[in-house]
Image (tube, coloured by chain):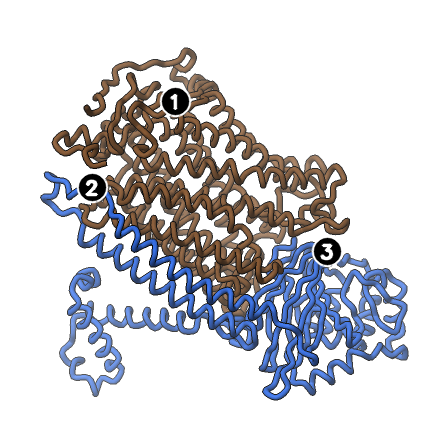
Chain colours: A brown, B blue
């Protein structure tokens, strides 16, 4: 028996959200506890911060385009790269994950909402206030203490540069407090996704029938619960150092600067996987649909993801090969770093195995997935090079590392998010994103990405350290930096096209219908956009692809699984 | 369009390559019968353009820097241990990565081309394959083998570099990071200097490595001279060690590689590698204190009367400050302000008058001196050879 085809005539609208005036609609957003609205609010806010932090990146690139440039003052430059990094990780990456999880997990497991809807809203508002607080530092930090402005200590804020002796004023306190707030948001959102996936699955959906995206979200959110406390604890210790006379990281009183680095990277390295696994999740949903085949090796994909989650908590000190650990310590972290490559490789091969023998349709989500595969492969290989500790002594804190992690986070994470965005936008809005604008966005972004970040590896090989506001001519960096800047500008234009596309297609796009991609998971049984309560009656599933079973009653999946 | 068509047809690629050859001959019209046939314009400029483009790309890849070769710190052109050993390992790793890249990208391209959607496919779905345990096993075991090789190579190199003990004749130096300059001490030789680390070259019969102790006076810094060695951090309340063994005399540039505040970008280090004889001469010069009889007595008085002495040391005088660089042999150094400007009289004058104009945010304040005082002071500083 396949799942029931559900008619979606019932629409239930809460009182107070009925009006169509702007005030009514804003009021509706403020009081909402609906997982879909909150999901979209997360994603919308993340896009806003993406644009702001992206503009900072453009300013940074303009400053570095030519040697001895005076476009930005040193302090302004230092604030920009700190705010850029902090924003991109905590105000773009984390909310995109939360938004994706919020919007999709209940729909994919056949639930009506998240397990804790009000806590869900609380999480969003904590994140938003945290983000606003970080940016308020531009106004508040000089106003309150007469000193400083936005944080300028780098996104990993190494001690003792953050101590009272070297960071006067309140800018570092803004960095600490705003991230503590967003961490509260991320934590409750993680708990919510985990509980939803474990307890609210529809009848028939056992763990091994969950869509892969839900599995990967589960792993990611467990990792958030595991990793974030390390950062929060370190930040509280730093706050105690700064205001209550503590000496955790106060080297002049016998504290340890290296302990901060350990705390930070115990959070920081899992964080990288926290960001990339949701991109894996999107790719794992999209590649099968556009290859017209089920995912190759579903149980292996689940296992490999769990392995990545486990191993990734034991690799943190590969960010610290140059702090002078013992040779045994360095060897241990080099080995654990290489080990991550094994499950990651398995995932890449499984995606290729899914495409192999399929009939690949090159719609926009699939194009982004293919670019993701290519770029993530390179990011993984440069990551392996960085895992070779002796080579890491040369490359760490150089532009090679900057290129490597932008390859991971832009070429990997962001491309995965774009793929997901083009794939589920029709579900959320009811209209398809314009194909031609989307193609322009895709190609401009791919070209800009490669011009920018492929080139960026080379100054690192020529000895250019990261986080420098200027450099002298004659060291072979100038041409490479100019090219990098041109690539960054190209990406900025592409993002502009995306924003135009989002706004235009929301009004004028082609109507999507329930299931524009001929897909197989439960969210495509609902109308687009889905009604307030998602499913009028709980769907019943018998396999990983309930819609395949519906569409192919003669050859359903449940016969083979 | 031509290139696009050519991608599908290898013969066209070959024919286009031969076009390029003809264009090269084109420079000598007499030797080129093709010229007389007046080819269509489109055919003429396109190969030229692509030829020019490929020359640029190749030049860029082969020699990635258009900069001054003496200042390009390419870590693939190491001139010292352990940078050489690191380069050898990295070439092996690079080869492994390149092989993996080619294989996976080959598979990806094959899958995209071979299994693309074709018109007429709409009606049916491809065979539904759910996976294969044998294949999964294969692509689990293969990466494990590769990882095993990498682990062996890496641990060997780590142990090789990190566990090196100083031989009896090794030079010992201490590098102390400051916001935004380097203090360099030779405790055994009684020398203190700044921003320029002098070391002897290691020659075939007398190997003379230099062992460095790394410390910091304030925040974390990192010592990185790419052509000599990988970087090691200078962390307050901690002592790190590294060693170098350069063989070619010359000047090697490096930067602070750990973000350390406002002027992190302008915290440059120079390693001056000298032949053993020259190094010994430099040591003898540096060991001398400044002579009290100078012909710049006013400047000397100005220096000692102002608060210069709170931060700077000039051995042989009452100036014993430790916060700023030791100035005893200031004029023996090539640059000022940790590599920001060349050490000339003009720059010295600008620097003394207002350091913030040359290196904004640096910790040396503007001392508000009159022009006359500045001139006297610079005249005195110039005697510190």
Location of residue A503 by image quarter: top left
Determine if residue A227 is in view: yes
Camera-nearest residue between A252 and B284 = A252
Q: Residue B237 carries which label?
A: 3
| Chain letter, disc 2 residue | A
Assess disc 3: are there few (<14), some (14-19) or many (≥20) residues with their C-alpha within 10 Å of its C-alpha: many
Q: Name the residue under label 2.
A: A292
Quadrant where the N terminus of chain B sits is bottom left
Assess disc 1: are there few (<14), some (14-19) or many (≥20) residues with their C-alpha within 10 Å of its C-alpha: many
What's the residue at 88%, 74% (across, down)? B316
| Chain letter, disc 3 residue | B
Q: Mark 1 points at which residue?
A: A113
In this rendering, the answer to whether A335 lies above or below B47 is: above
What's the residue at 19%, 63% (across, down)? B2
Assess disc 2: are there few (<14), some (14-19) or many (≥20) residues with their C-alpha within 10 Å of its C-alpha: many
Camera-nearest residue between A8 and B90 = B90
């Amino acid at each position: 028996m396949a799942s029931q085809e559900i008619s979606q005539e019932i629409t239930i609208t809460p009182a107070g959200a009925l009006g169509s005036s702007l005030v009514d609609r804003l009021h509706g957003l403020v009081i909402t506890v609906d997982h879909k609205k909150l999901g979209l609010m997360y994603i919308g806010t993340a896009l806003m911060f993406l644009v702001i932090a992206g503009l900072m990146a453009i300013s940074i690139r303009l400053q570095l385009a030519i040697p001895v440039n005076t476009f930005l003052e040193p302090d302004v430059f230092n604030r920009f790269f700190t705010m850029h990094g902090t924003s991109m990780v905590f105000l773009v990456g984390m909310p995109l994950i939360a938004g994706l999880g919020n919007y999709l997990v209940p729909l994919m497991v056949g639930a009506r909402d998240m397990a804790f809807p009000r806590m869900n809203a609380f999480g969003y508002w904590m994140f938003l206030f945290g983000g606003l607080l970080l940016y308020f530092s531009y106004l508040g930090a000089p106003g309150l203490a007469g000193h400083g402005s936005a944080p300028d200590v780098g996104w990993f804020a190494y001690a003792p540069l953050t101590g009272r002796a070297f960071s006067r004023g309140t800018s570092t306190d803004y960095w600490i407090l705003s991230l503590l707030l967003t961490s509260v948001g991320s934590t409750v959102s993680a708990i919510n996704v985990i509980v939803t996936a474990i307890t609210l699955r529809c009848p028939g959906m056992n763990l091994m029938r969950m869509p892969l995206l839900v599995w990967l979200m589960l792993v990611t959110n467990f990792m958030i619960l595991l990793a974030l406390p390390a950062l929060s604890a370190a930040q509280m210790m730093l706050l105690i150092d700064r205001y209550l006379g503590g000496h955790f990281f106060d080297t002049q009183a016998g504290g340890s600067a290296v302990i901060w680095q350990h705390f930070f990277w115990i959070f920081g390295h899992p964080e990288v996987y926290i960001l990339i696994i949701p991109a894996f999740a999107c790719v794992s949903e999209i590649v099968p649909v556009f290859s017209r085949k089920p995912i190759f090796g579903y149980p292996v994909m689940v296992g490999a993801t769990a392995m990545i989650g486990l191993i990734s908590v034991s690799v943190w000190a590969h960010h610290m090969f140059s702090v002078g650990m013992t040779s045994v310590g360095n060897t241990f972290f080099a080995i654990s770093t290489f080990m991550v490559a094994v499950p990651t490789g398995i995932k890449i091969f499984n995606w290729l195995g899914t495409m192999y023998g399929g009939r690949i349709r090159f719609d926009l989500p699939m194009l982004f997935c293919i670019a993701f595969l290519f770029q993530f492969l390179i990011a993984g290989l440069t990551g392996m090079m960085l895992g070779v500790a002796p080579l890491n002594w040369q490359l760490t804190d150089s532009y090679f590392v900057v290129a490597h992690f932008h390859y991971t986070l832009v070429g990997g994470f962001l491309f995965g998010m774009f793929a997901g965005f083009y794939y589920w936008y029709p579900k959320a809005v009811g209209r398809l994103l314009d194909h031609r604008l989307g193609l322009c966005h895709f190609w401009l972004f791919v070209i800009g990405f490669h011009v920018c970040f492929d080139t960026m590896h080379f100054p690192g090989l020529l000895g250019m350290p990261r986080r420098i506001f200027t450099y002298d001519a004659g060291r072979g960096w100038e041409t490479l930096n100019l090219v990098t800047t041109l690539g960054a500008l190209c990406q900025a234009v592409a993002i502009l096209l995306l924003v135009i596309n989002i706004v235009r297609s929301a009004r004028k796009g082609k109507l999507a219908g329930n299931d524009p991609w001929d897909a197989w998971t439960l969210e495509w049984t609902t109308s687009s956009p889905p009604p307030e309560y998602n499913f009028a009656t709980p769907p019943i599933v018998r396999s990983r692809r309930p819609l395949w079973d519906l569409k192919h009653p003669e050859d359903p999946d449940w016969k083979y699984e | 369009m031509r290139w696009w068509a050519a991608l599908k047809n290898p013969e066209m690629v070959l024919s286009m390559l031969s076009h390029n050859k003809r264009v090269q001959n084109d420079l000598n019209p007499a030797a080129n019968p093709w010229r007389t046939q007046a080819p269509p314009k489109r055919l003429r400029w396109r190969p030229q353009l692509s030829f020019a483009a490929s020359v640029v790309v190749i030049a860029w890849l082969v020699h990635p820097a258009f900069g001054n070769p003496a200042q390009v710190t390419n870590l693939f052109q190491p001139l010292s241990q352990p940078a050489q050993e690191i380069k050898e390992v990295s070439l092996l790793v690079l080869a492994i990565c390149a092989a993996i890249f080619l294989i996976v990208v080959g598979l990806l391209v094959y899958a995209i081309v071979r299994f693309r959607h074709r018109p007429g496919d709409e009606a049916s779905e491809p065979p539904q394959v759910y996976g294969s345990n044998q294949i999964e096993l294969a692509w689990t075991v293969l990466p494990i083998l590769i990882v095993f090789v990498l682990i062996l190579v890496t641990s060997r190199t780590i142990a090789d570099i990190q566990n090196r003990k100083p031989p009896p004749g090794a030079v010992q130096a201490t590098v102390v990071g400051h916001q935004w300059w380097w203090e360099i001490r030779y405790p055994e030789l009684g020398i203190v200097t700044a921003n320029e680390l002098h070391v002897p070259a290691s020659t075939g019969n007398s190997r003379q490595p230099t062992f460095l102790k790394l410390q910091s006076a304030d925040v974390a810094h990192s010592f990185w001279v790419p052509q000599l060695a990988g970087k090691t951090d200078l962390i307050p309340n901690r002592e790190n060690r590294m060693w170098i063994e350069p063989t070619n005399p010359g000047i090697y540039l490096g930067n602070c590689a750990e973000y350390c505040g406002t002027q992190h970008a302008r915290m440059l280090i120079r390693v001056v590698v000298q032949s053993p004889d020259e190094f010994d001469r430099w040591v003898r010069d540096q060991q001398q204190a400044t002579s009290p009889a100078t012909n710049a007595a006013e400047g000397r008085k100005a220096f000692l009367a102002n608060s210069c002495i709170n931060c700077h040391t000039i051995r042989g005088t009452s100036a014993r400050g430790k916060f700023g660089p030791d100035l005893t042999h200031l004029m023996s150094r090539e640059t000022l302000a940790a590599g920001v400007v060349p050490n000339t009289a003009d720059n010295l004058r600008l620097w003394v008058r207002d350091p913030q104009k040359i290196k904004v945010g640096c910790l040396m304040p503007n001392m508000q001196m009159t022009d006359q005082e500045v001139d006297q002071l610079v005249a005195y500083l110039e005697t510190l050879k």
